[in-house]
Image: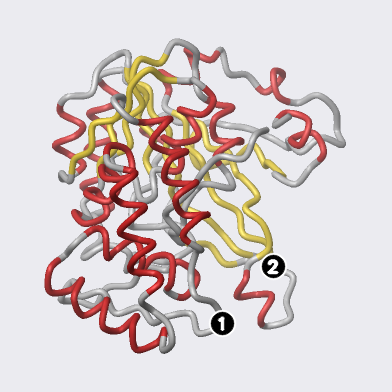
Protein backbone atom coordinates (compact mmCIF):
# COMPACT_ATOMS: atom_id res chain seq x y z
CA UNK A 1 0.00 0.00 0.00
CA UNK A 2 1.23 3.53 -0.80
CA UNK A 3 2.84 5.30 2.14
CA UNK A 4 0.38 7.49 4.04
CA UNK A 5 1.62 10.95 5.11
CA UNK A 6 1.90 11.66 8.84
CA UNK A 7 3.28 15.09 9.83
CA UNK A 8 2.32 14.78 13.51
CA UNK A 9 4.49 12.48 15.61
CA UNK A 10 2.30 11.18 18.42
CA UNK A 11 3.02 8.28 20.74
CA UNK A 12 0.06 5.94 20.88
CA UNK A 13 -1.00 6.82 17.35
CA UNK A 14 -2.76 4.02 15.51
CA UNK A 15 -0.85 4.76 12.31
CA UNK A 16 0.79 1.32 12.17
CA UNK A 17 -2.42 -0.50 13.06
CA UNK A 18 -4.60 1.59 10.76
CA UNK A 19 -4.49 -0.86 7.79
CA UNK A 20 -5.80 -3.63 10.04
CA UNK A 21 -8.42 -1.45 11.75
CA UNK A 22 -9.72 -0.33 8.37
CA UNK A 23 -10.52 -3.95 7.51
CA UNK A 24 -13.50 -3.66 9.83
CA UNK A 25 -14.94 -0.56 8.17
CA UNK A 26 -18.23 -1.10 6.31
CA UNK A 27 -18.90 0.16 2.82
CA UNK A 28 -20.90 3.30 2.24
CA UNK A 29 -19.65 5.42 5.16
CA UNK A 30 -20.77 9.01 4.80
CA UNK A 31 -18.65 10.40 7.64
CA UNK A 32 -15.92 9.07 9.91
CA UNK A 33 -16.04 10.57 13.40
CA UNK A 34 -12.98 10.53 15.70
CA UNK A 35 -13.92 11.90 19.16
CA UNK A 36 -10.38 11.23 20.48
CA UNK A 37 -8.45 11.96 17.29
CA UNK A 38 -4.87 12.35 18.53
CA UNK A 39 -2.84 12.61 15.32
CA UNK A 40 -5.95 11.72 13.28
CA UNK A 41 -4.10 8.70 11.88
CA UNK A 42 -7.30 6.76 11.29
CA UNK A 43 -8.99 9.66 9.49
CA UNK A 44 -5.95 10.16 7.26
CA UNK A 45 -5.72 6.44 6.45
CA UNK A 46 -9.47 6.29 5.79
CA UNK A 47 -9.23 9.25 3.41
CA UNK A 48 -6.27 7.67 1.62
CA UNK A 49 -8.32 4.52 1.03
CA UNK A 50 -11.43 6.47 0.00
CA UNK A 51 -13.59 4.79 2.65
CA UNK A 52 -15.50 7.90 3.79
CA UNK A 53 -16.74 11.10 2.17
CA UNK A 54 -16.39 13.42 5.17
CA UNK A 55 -14.57 13.52 8.50
CA UNK A 56 -15.19 14.92 11.95
CA UNK A 57 -11.88 15.21 13.77
CA UNK A 58 -12.20 16.06 17.46
CA UNK A 59 -9.74 16.17 20.33
CA UNK A 60 -10.05 17.69 23.79
CA UNK A 61 -6.46 18.94 23.44
CA UNK A 62 -7.26 22.29 21.83
CA UNK A 63 -3.80 23.15 20.43
CA UNK A 64 -3.69 19.71 18.85
CA UNK A 65 -7.13 20.19 17.29
CA UNK A 66 -6.09 23.60 15.98
CA UNK A 67 -2.92 22.08 14.57
CA UNK A 68 -4.90 19.42 12.73
CA UNK A 69 -7.07 22.16 11.24
CA UNK A 70 -3.98 24.07 10.06
CA UNK A 71 -2.59 20.91 8.46
CA UNK A 72 -5.81 20.38 6.53
CA UNK A 73 -6.65 23.97 5.61
CA UNK A 74 -3.44 26.07 5.70
CA UNK A 75 -0.64 23.64 4.81
CA UNK A 76 1.57 26.11 2.94
CA UNK A 77 1.68 28.61 5.81
CA UNK A 78 2.25 25.87 8.38
CA UNK A 79 5.07 24.31 6.37
CA UNK A 80 6.81 27.67 5.99
CA UNK A 81 6.50 28.45 9.72
CA UNK A 82 7.89 25.04 10.67
CA UNK A 83 10.88 25.46 8.33
CA UNK A 84 11.74 28.84 9.82
CA UNK A 85 11.43 27.54 13.38
CA UNK A 86 13.40 24.36 12.63
CA UNK A 87 16.28 26.37 11.11
CA UNK A 88 16.44 28.56 14.22
CA UNK A 89 17.46 25.63 16.43
CA UNK A 90 21.08 25.80 15.31
CA UNK A 91 23.61 25.90 16.88
CA UNK A 92 22.08 25.01 20.28
CA UNK A 93 18.99 22.93 19.59
CA UNK A 94 18.40 21.94 23.23
CA UNK A 95 18.12 25.51 24.49
CA UNK A 96 16.00 26.33 21.47
CA UNK A 97 13.57 23.52 22.30
CA UNK A 98 13.07 24.75 25.86
CA UNK A 99 12.52 28.33 24.67
CA UNK A 100 9.90 27.14 22.19
CA UNK A 101 8.28 24.97 24.85
CA UNK A 102 8.08 27.92 27.24
CA UNK A 103 6.49 30.08 24.54
CA UNK A 104 4.02 27.33 23.66
CA UNK A 105 2.94 26.92 27.29
CA UNK A 106 2.37 30.67 27.43
CA UNK A 107 0.57 31.11 24.09
CA UNK A 108 -0.76 27.64 23.15
CA UNK A 109 0.23 28.43 19.55
CA UNK A 110 -0.45 25.20 17.56
CA UNK A 111 2.34 26.00 15.08
CA UNK A 112 4.86 25.77 17.91
CA UNK A 113 3.24 22.51 18.97
CA UNK A 114 4.13 20.91 15.63
CA UNK A 115 7.83 21.62 16.17
CA UNK A 116 7.72 20.34 19.76
CA UNK A 117 6.02 17.12 18.66
CA UNK A 118 8.64 16.55 15.98
CA UNK A 119 11.48 17.28 18.38
CA UNK A 120 10.48 15.73 21.72
CA UNK A 121 11.38 12.26 22.98
CA UNK A 122 9.56 9.53 20.99
CA UNK A 123 6.89 12.02 19.88
CA UNK A 124 5.56 11.49 23.39
CA UNK A 125 3.39 14.36 24.60
CA UNK A 126 3.42 14.72 28.38
CA UNK A 127 1.57 17.20 30.57
CA UNK A 128 1.85 17.81 34.27
CA UNK A 129 -1.19 17.98 36.54
CA UNK A 130 -1.61 21.68 35.72
CA UNK A 131 -1.86 21.01 31.99
CA UNK A 132 1.65 22.30 31.23
CA UNK A 133 3.61 20.53 28.51
CA UNK A 134 6.76 19.21 30.20
CA UNK A 135 8.29 16.69 27.81
CA UNK A 136 12.03 16.92 27.06
CA UNK A 137 13.82 17.11 23.70
CA UNK A 138 15.32 14.07 22.04
CA UNK A 139 19.03 14.83 22.24
CA UNK A 140 19.91 12.29 19.52
CA UNK A 141 17.94 13.98 16.73
CA UNK A 142 16.75 17.37 15.62
CA UNK A 143 13.27 16.53 14.44
CA UNK A 144 11.72 16.03 11.02
CA UNK A 145 13.55 17.92 8.29
CA UNK A 146 11.51 20.78 6.78
CA UNK A 147 11.29 19.27 3.30
CA UNK A 148 9.94 16.01 4.73
CA UNK A 149 7.51 17.84 7.02
CA UNK A 150 6.23 19.97 4.15
CA UNK A 151 5.68 16.88 2.02
CA UNK A 152 3.70 15.19 4.80
CA UNK A 153 1.64 18.29 5.57
CA UNK A 154 0.72 18.76 1.92
CA UNK A 155 -0.10 15.06 1.62
CA UNK A 156 -2.61 15.22 4.48
CA UNK A 157 -4.07 18.48 3.14
CA UNK A 158 -4.75 16.84 -0.21
CA UNK A 159 -6.67 14.11 1.62
CA UNK A 160 -8.65 16.21 4.12
CA UNK A 161 -8.93 19.78 2.81
CA UNK A 162 -12.59 20.73 2.45
CA UNK A 163 -13.71 17.37 3.85
CA UNK A 164 -12.86 17.59 7.55
CA UNK A 165 -14.48 19.51 10.36
CA UNK A 166 -12.18 19.94 13.37
CA UNK A 167 -13.41 20.62 16.90
CA UNK A 168 -12.20 20.45 20.50
CA UNK A 169 -15.22 19.18 22.42
CA UNK A 170 -15.98 16.74 25.18
CA UNK A 171 -16.63 13.37 23.54
CA UNK A 172 -20.19 13.29 24.89
CA UNK A 173 -20.99 16.44 22.93
CA UNK A 174 -19.73 14.71 19.79
CA UNK A 175 -21.91 11.67 20.46
CA UNK A 176 -25.06 13.80 20.58
CA UNK A 177 -24.99 14.60 16.88
CA UNK A 178 -23.64 11.45 15.23
CA UNK A 179 -26.05 9.62 12.94
CA UNK A 180 -26.86 6.36 11.23
CA UNK A 181 -24.56 7.02 8.24
CA UNK A 182 -21.56 7.81 10.46
CA UNK A 183 -18.86 5.45 11.69
CA UNK A 184 -17.29 6.40 15.02
CA UNK A 185 -13.72 5.32 15.77
CA UNK A 186 -12.58 5.83 19.37
CA UNK A 187 -9.17 5.62 21.00
CA UNK A 188 -9.99 7.15 24.40
CA UNK A 189 -7.31 8.47 26.77
CA UNK A 190 -8.14 6.34 29.77
CA UNK A 191 -6.89 2.82 29.28
CA UNK A 192 -4.59 0.95 26.91
CA UNK A 193 -0.91 0.20 27.31
CA UNK A 194 -0.21 3.50 29.08
CA UNK A 195 -2.16 2.55 32.21
CA UNK A 196 -4.92 4.39 34.03
CA UNK A 197 -3.86 7.97 33.35
CA UNK A 198 -2.98 9.14 29.86
CA UNK A 199 -0.63 12.10 30.24
CA UNK A 200 -1.25 13.09 26.62
CA UNK A 201 -4.37 14.74 28.00
CA UNK A 202 -4.97 17.12 30.87
CA UNK A 203 -7.14 14.44 32.49
CA UNK A 204 -8.50 11.00 31.76
CA UNK A 205 -12.13 10.05 31.33
CA UNK A 206 -14.32 8.13 33.70
CA UNK A 207 -14.58 4.45 32.82
CA UNK A 208 -18.12 4.31 34.19
CA UNK A 209 -19.17 7.47 32.34
CA UNK A 210 -17.70 6.12 29.13
CA UNK A 211 -19.66 2.87 29.50
CA UNK A 212 -22.88 4.85 29.99
CA UNK A 213 -22.18 6.82 26.83
CA UNK A 214 -21.52 3.59 24.91
CA UNK A 215 -24.81 2.15 26.15
CA UNK A 216 -26.60 5.12 24.59
CA UNK A 217 -24.77 4.63 21.29
CA UNK A 218 -25.67 0.93 21.36
CA UNK A 219 -29.33 1.72 22.02
CA UNK A 220 -29.28 4.08 19.02
CA UNK A 221 -27.86 1.22 16.91
CA UNK A 222 -24.88 3.28 15.75
CA UNK A 223 -21.74 1.96 14.11
CA UNK A 224 -18.63 2.29 16.23
CA UNK A 225 -15.17 0.81 16.83
CA UNK A 226 -13.15 1.24 20.02
CA UNK A 227 -9.48 0.71 20.82
CA UNK A 228 -9.48 0.27 24.57
CA UNK A 229 -7.74 -2.26 26.82
CA UNK A 230 -4.50 -4.10 26.16
CA UNK A 231 -1.80 -6.35 27.52
CA UNK A 232 1.95 -6.85 27.39
CA UNK A 233 3.12 -10.35 28.16
CA UNK A 234 1.10 -11.45 31.18
CA UNK A 235 0.35 -7.90 32.32
CA UNK A 236 -3.01 -6.42 31.35
CA UNK A 237 -3.93 -2.73 31.14
CA UNK A 238 -7.44 -1.58 31.85
CA UNK A 239 -10.76 -3.32 32.17
CA UNK A 240 -12.59 -5.19 29.43
CA UNK A 241 -15.72 -3.51 28.15
CA UNK A 242 -18.74 -5.21 29.75
CA UNK A 243 -20.70 -8.04 28.16
CA UNK A 244 -23.87 -5.93 28.41
CA UNK A 245 -22.67 -3.87 25.44
CA UNK A 246 -22.74 -7.03 23.28
CA UNK A 247 -19.63 -6.03 21.38
CA UNK A 248 -17.10 -8.20 19.56
CA UNK A 249 -13.53 -7.99 20.85
CA UNK A 250 -10.58 -8.46 18.52
CA UNK A 251 -7.02 -8.66 19.83
CA UNK A 252 -4.40 -7.04 17.61
CA UNK A 253 -0.68 -7.68 17.94
CA UNK A 254 0.90 -4.24 18.06
CA UNK A 255 4.52 -5.42 18.06
CA UNK A 256 7.32 -5.88 20.53
CA UNK A 257 7.28 -3.51 23.47
CA UNK A 258 10.09 -0.93 23.34
CA UNK A 259 10.24 -0.98 27.13
CA UNK A 260 10.65 -4.76 27.12
CA UNK A 261 13.36 -4.50 24.48
CA UNK A 262 15.34 -2.12 26.68
CA UNK A 263 15.08 -4.66 29.50
CA UNK A 264 16.20 -7.52 27.25
CA UNK A 265 12.76 -9.14 27.30
CA UNK A 266 10.65 -10.40 24.41
CA UNK A 267 7.21 -9.26 25.47
CA UNK A 268 4.75 -8.33 22.75
CA UNK A 269 2.05 -5.70 23.14
CA UNK A 270 -1.53 -6.56 22.22
CA UNK A 271 -4.35 -4.05 21.85
CA UNK A 272 -8.07 -4.75 21.90
CA UNK A 273 -10.45 -3.57 19.21
CA UNK A 274 -14.18 -3.65 19.94
CA UNK A 275 -16.89 -3.64 17.26
CA UNK A 276 -20.42 -2.54 18.07
CA UNK A 277 -23.32 -4.94 17.56
CA UNK A 278 -24.74 -2.77 14.79
CA UNK A 279 -21.39 -2.85 13.00
CA UNK A 280 -20.94 -6.63 13.19
CA UNK A 281 -24.46 -7.06 11.83
CA UNK A 282 -23.69 -4.63 9.00
CA UNK A 283 -20.49 -6.54 8.19
CA UNK A 284 -22.14 -9.96 8.53
CA UNK A 285 -19.20 -10.65 10.81
CA UNK A 286 -18.76 -14.36 11.54
CA UNK A 287 -15.71 -16.41 12.59
CA UNK A 288 -15.90 -18.45 9.38
CA UNK A 289 -15.42 -15.26 7.35
CA UNK A 290 -12.00 -14.69 8.92
CA UNK A 291 -10.62 -18.12 9.79
CA UNK A 292 -9.06 -19.37 6.57
CA UNK A 293 -6.62 -21.93 7.91
CA UNK A 294 -4.90 -22.83 11.15
CA UNK A 295 -1.64 -21.12 10.17
CA UNK A 296 -3.28 -17.75 9.55
CA UNK A 297 -3.27 -15.07 12.26
CA UNK A 298 -6.81 -15.67 13.50
CA UNK A 299 -7.49 -17.76 16.58
CA UNK A 300 -10.94 -17.26 18.06
CA UNK A 301 -13.82 -14.87 18.49
CA UNK A 302 -16.67 -14.36 20.93
CA UNK A 303 -18.84 -11.54 22.15
CA UNK A 304 -17.35 -8.83 24.38
CA UNK A 305 -14.44 -9.52 26.70
CA UNK A 306 -14.48 -13.31 27.06
CA UNK A 307 -12.66 -14.53 23.99
CA UNK A 308 -11.19 -12.73 21.03
CA UNK A 309 -9.86 -12.82 17.53
CA UNK A 310 -6.08 -12.75 17.84
CA UNK A 311 -4.47 -10.83 14.98
CA UNK A 312 -0.75 -10.94 14.19
CA UNK A 313 -0.15 -7.78 12.15
CA UNK A 314 3.27 -8.96 10.95
CA UNK A 315 1.88 -12.19 9.48
CA UNK A 316 2.31 -12.62 5.68
CA UNK A 317 -1.49 -12.91 5.38
CA UNK A 318 -1.78 -9.24 6.34
CA UNK A 319 1.07 -8.15 4.10
CA UNK A 320 -0.99 -9.52 1.22
CA UNK A 321 -4.08 -7.66 2.41
CA UNK A 322 -2.22 -4.36 2.47
CA UNK A 323 -0.90 -4.55 -1.06
Disc number at residue 267? Answer: 2
Q: Which residue is mark 1?
A: 140
Residue sitting at x 56%, y 12%: 284
Disc number at residue 240? Answer: none
Residue sitting at x 52%, y 54%: 148
Up the image or down, 119 lies above or below 81; here it is below
Q: Position of residue 293 (x, y in %)?
A: 85, 28
Local SS, label 1: loop
Residue sitting at x 27%, y 54%: 64
Q: Nearer the viewer, residue 52 or 76?
A: 76
Q: Is residue 290 visible?
A: yes
Q: Nearer the viewer, residue 296 or 152?
A: 152
Q: Quadrant of residue 111?
A: bottom left
Q: Position of residue 228 (x, y in %)?
A: 43, 48
Q: Position of residue 13 (x, y in %)?
A: 47, 52
Up the image or down, 64 lies above or below 155; here it is below
Amino acid sequence: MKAIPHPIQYQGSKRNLAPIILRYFPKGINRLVEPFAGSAAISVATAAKGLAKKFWVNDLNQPLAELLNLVAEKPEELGAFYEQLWNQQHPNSIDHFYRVREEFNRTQDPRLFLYLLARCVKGSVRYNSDGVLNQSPDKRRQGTRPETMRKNIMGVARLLRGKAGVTSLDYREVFKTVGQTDLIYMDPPYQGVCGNRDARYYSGISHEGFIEALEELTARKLLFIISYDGRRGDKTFGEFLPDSLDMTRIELEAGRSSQSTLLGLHEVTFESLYLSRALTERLNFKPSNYQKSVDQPVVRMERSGVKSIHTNTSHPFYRLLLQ
